[in-house]
């Protein structure tokens, strides 16, 4: 009896995955510039809703960040107008975050983390401090400290949180994305959470 080898099943899904995988891996964030043709056209494949920075700020200054807690996306513009889009985690509830204008006051690589007083009240079993570089550190590899006490834009080692309501008030990004934003962001960058 002849033994025949079955060929792998070809599906539309397998075709798309094999075709798009190299591009997704090579491009950690979507980049747009002021010179991008057809302004306002979304270039990514998700349902991110983008914002025009001019609707929120007068000038680009040192750069701008808009974080949309509804669509769970962060847009970052450099001073020269290049814009990149990143998926984020957002607060568990509306009561846990602030909305409005703030700015980046400090940048820390491998920041230590300590729970806020309200976190300690809700979760007394949490440790008082987790040092930077520890895989259990909720701030991941980088953090942008905002002018609002206790609020940060930071990385996370727990990639399941991205795209979800999962934080205690901060905006979280994949570690590779916050490292990119961190390198491109200056202290004084204006930020708006909407």
Image (spheres, rainbow, N blue to C red):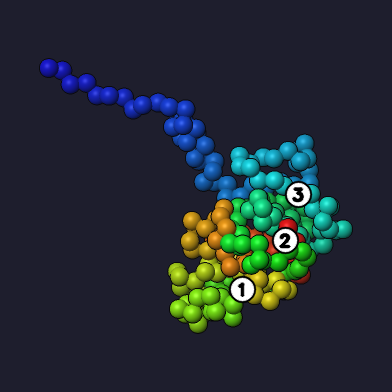
Residue 28: x %, y % from top left: 57, 50
Q: Which type of secondary structure does the marked residue at label 3 adopt? A: loop
Residue with the mark numbered 2: 193
| In the rendered image, the vertical position of residue 12 relative to residue 31, given as above or below | above
Can residue 156 be seen from the camera position used here?
yes
Disc marking residue 51 = 3
What distance separates the C-alpha of mark 3 from that of mark 1? 27 Å
What distance separates the C-alpha of mark 1 from that of mark 2? 20 Å
Residue 23: x %, y % from top left: 54, 41
Q: Which type of secondary structure does the marked residue at label 1 adopt? A: strand
Quarter occupied by residue 168? bottom right
Apparent side of residue 178 relative to residue 34 in the rendered image (left or right) = left
Disc marking residue 108 = 1
Q: CB of mark 2 within 8 Å of CB of mark 3? A: no
Q: Nearer the viewer, mark 3 or mark 1?
A: 3
Viewport quadrant of the N terminus:
top left
């Amino acid at each position: 009896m002849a033994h025949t080898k079955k060929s792998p099943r070809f599906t539309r899904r397998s075709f798309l995955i094999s075709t798009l995988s190299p591009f997704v891996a090579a491009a950690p964030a979507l980049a747009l510039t002021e010179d991008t043709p057809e302004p306002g056209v979304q270039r990514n494949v998700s349902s991110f809703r983008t914002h025009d920075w001019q609707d929120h700020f007068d000038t680009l200054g040192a750069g701008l960040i808009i974080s949309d807690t509804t669509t769970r996306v962060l847009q970052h513009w450099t001073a020269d107008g290049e814009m990149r889009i990143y998926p984020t985690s957002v607060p568990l509830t509306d009561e846990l975050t602030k909305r409005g204008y703030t700015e980046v006051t400090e940048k820390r690589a491998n920041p230590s983390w300590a729970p806020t007083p309200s976190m300690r009240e809700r979760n007394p079993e949490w440790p008082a401090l987790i040092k930077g570089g520890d895989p259990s550190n909720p701030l991941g590899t980088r953090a942008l400290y905002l002018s609002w006490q206790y609020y940060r834009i930071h990385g996370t080692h727990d990639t399941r949180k991205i795209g979800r309501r999962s934080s205690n008030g901060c905006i979280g990004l994949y570690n590779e994305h916050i490292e990119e934003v961190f390198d491109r962001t200056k202290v004084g960058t204006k930020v708006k959470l909407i």
